[in-house]
Image: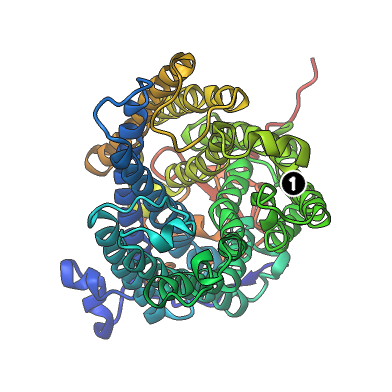
């Protein structure tokens, strides 16, 4: 039995809210509309990704030759730090939760906004302030500690470590406020009839991510404060010169940073759950298993930080426990992959741009997960530790997972966010370039690592040059694919056709409003049904797209044609 979501019935804002709905810089700067805040996040994180991506191409170009070409070792370390820090703290962590999450969570709930709109806007400005502070610190004299700020080097170098850590501290508050806002929104603003197990899986993934953000990010903030205090006061926490222990820093840092891996990857998994169901036009297989696996990943993420430290001198028993837990965390991830594949089985799969990115995600993330088994086993982690094998595994999970999931989500919800359709052919071309370029870049690095090539080195022995050159060529192909994707999205804003409310035939609530949504998201109260109930659906042509037909109405032609006998 369906229920009606409580939502304002008017599509235009009242006079008191006209300033935050009208056009102009001031209206955007002061807006409390979650959609505009999400779009501002989207522009900001994409700009950060552009900068970090250019720096990655600079690093790969320097590695074309085994000796110094145009970067000194010191400059290489500085560019490496910039690339890693910007990519992790300014792009990957906020990309899906803050950008897509801000736009989609209230619309998927049938609500008019998040629970705390002003806190939402302050979170964005905290991110902007932290990003400016962070980038200024990184660029000033050039920090070369790497994005992890490992001690004891970060407590003895003359670089602006304190300023950079304060930037991370500010960014952490933005992450905490965003996570808190989503937890309260999902708990308190679900409409009548939307129980926990009638929520879209993207909301489950966002909820699990928010739990990690709220519980784990304060640990990073405290760690950054301790590192700053160590640099200024020399109180002997991490620096052996003052009876400190640098391994303590690693424990603190990875206690946050391994859950942060799932802050980066869980939202992407939520995106793929939506894409797999919508573009297969089939109810998601094993809904409850996927939902529970998101919570299981969030819980396991707090227990496996020690697998980053197998070579740090931990007790054998502790290493054994962390190794076992590392293998356990792969189980809920594997559940998701198997259920996604089962969802496609006997579905009406449409190989459009979002679905191509979803399939790319599964392929790349599976490689990243399987290669993690070598790093979770004590016997193989020791020779592979700090080699290019780790670099490749990390990028298969982070870039192949988070970035590709982000791109899939952008193309999937782009018509809803902008009201414009994109060129699907060129979107698929961009995905092909990304797939080929990514594998050309990082598959050779598995071989490099297994042969003993250490990571973070600007120079290497000539025997590794051919594989490095292949990896660099792949990075150019990957970069071309990303630029094509950007061009497709920009072109759609200028020349794209008007998007219908439901271009893909989705059944969740965001497809019941116009594209883009009105100020209060819905001009009439949306109908809450099962989130992946695709039967019956009726297609109204290119201008209107797919429309859900309530079961009490006259049955419309099914998207799955009835089987015919030969």
Q: Residues within 10 Å of mark 1 (few under 14, many from 20)?
A: some
Q: Quadrant of residue 422?
A: top left
Q: Which residue is mark 1?
A: 330
State how many labels appear: 1
The x, y position of residue 261, in whole percent, is 57, 53
- Give the quarter of the figure containing the C terminus: top right
456 sits to left or right of 50: right
Residue 113 can be seen in this image? no
238 and 88: which one is in front?
A: 238
The x, y position of residue 281, in whole percent, is 63, 40
- Give the quarter of the figure containing the N terminus: bottom right
SS at circle 1: helix
238 and 356: which one is in front?
A: 238
Residue in the image at 35% along x and 30% along y: 479
The x, y position of residue 434, in whole percent, is 44, 29
Residue 297 can be seen in this image? yes
């Amino acid at each position: 039995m369906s229920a009606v979501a409580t939502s304002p019935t008017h599509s235009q804002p009242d006079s008191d809210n006209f300033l935050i709905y009208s056009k102009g810089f001031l209206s955007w700067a002061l807006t409390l509309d979650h959609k505009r805040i999400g779009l501002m996040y989207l522009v900001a994180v994409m700009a950060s990704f552009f900068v970090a991506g250019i720096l990655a191409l600079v690093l790969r170009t320097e590695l074309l030759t085994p000796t110094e070409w145009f970067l000194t070792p010191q400059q290489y370390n500085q560019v490496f730090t910039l690339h890693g820090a910007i990519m992790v703290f300014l792009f990957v962590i906020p990309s899906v939760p803050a950008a897509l999450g801000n736009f989609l969570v209230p619309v998927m709930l049938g609500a008019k906004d998040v629970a705390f709109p002003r806190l939402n806007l302050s979170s964005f400005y905290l991110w902007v302030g932290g990003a400016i502070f962070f980038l200024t610190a990184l660029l000033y004299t050039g920090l070369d500690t790497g994005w992890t700020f490992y001690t004891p080097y970060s407590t003895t170098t003359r670089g602006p470590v304190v300023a950079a850590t304060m930037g991370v501290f500010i960014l952490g508050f933005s992450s905490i406020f965003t996570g808190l806002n989503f937890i309260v929104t999902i708990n308190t603003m679900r409409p009548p009839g939307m129980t926990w197990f009638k929520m879209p899986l993207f909301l489950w993934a966002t909820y699990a991510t928010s739990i990690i953000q709220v519980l784990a990010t304060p640990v990073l903030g405290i760690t950054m404060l301790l590192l700053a205090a160590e640099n200024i006061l020399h109180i002997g926490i991490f620096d052996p010169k003052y009876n400190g222990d640098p391994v303590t820093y690693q424990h603190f840092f990875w206690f946050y940073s391994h859950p942060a891996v799932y802050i980066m990857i869980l939202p992407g998994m939520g995106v793929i759950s939506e894409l797999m169901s919508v573009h297969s036009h089939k109810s998601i297989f094993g809904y409850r298993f996927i939902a529970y696996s998101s919570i299981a990943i969030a819980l396991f993420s707090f227990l496996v930080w020690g697998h980053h430290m197998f070579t740090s001198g931990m007790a054998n028993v502790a290493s054994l426990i962390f190794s076992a837990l590392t293998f356990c965390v792969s189980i809920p991830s594997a559940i998701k992959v198997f259920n996604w594949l089962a969802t496609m089985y006997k579905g009406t799969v449409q190989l459009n741009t979002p679905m191509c990115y979803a399939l790319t995600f599964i392929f790349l993330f599976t490689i990243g997960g399987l290669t993690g088994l070598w790093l979770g086993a004590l016997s193989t982690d020791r020779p592979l530790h700090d080699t290019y094998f780790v670099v490749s595994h990390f990028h298969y999970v982070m870039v192949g997972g988070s970035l590709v999931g982000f791109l899939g989500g952008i193309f999937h919800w782009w018509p809803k966010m902008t009201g414009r359709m994109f060129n699907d052919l060129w979107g698929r071309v961009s995905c092909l370039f990304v797939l080929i370029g990514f594998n050309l870049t990082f598959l050779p690095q598995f071989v490099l690592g297994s042969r003993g090539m250490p990571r973070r080195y600007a120079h290497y022995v000539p025997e590794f040059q051919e594989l490095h050159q292949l990896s660099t060529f792949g990075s150019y192909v990957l970069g071309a694919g990303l630029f094509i994707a950007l061009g497709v999205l920009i072109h759609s804003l200028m020349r794209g056709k008007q998007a219908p409310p439901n271009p893909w035939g989705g059944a969740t609530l965001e497809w019941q409003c116009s594209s883009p949504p009105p100020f209060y998201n819905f001009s009439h109260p949306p109908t809450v049904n099962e989130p992946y109930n695709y039967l019956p659906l009726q297609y109204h042509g290119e201008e209107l797209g797919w429309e859900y037909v309530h079961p009490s109405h006259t049955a419309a032609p099914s998207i799955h044609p009835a089987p015919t006998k030969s």
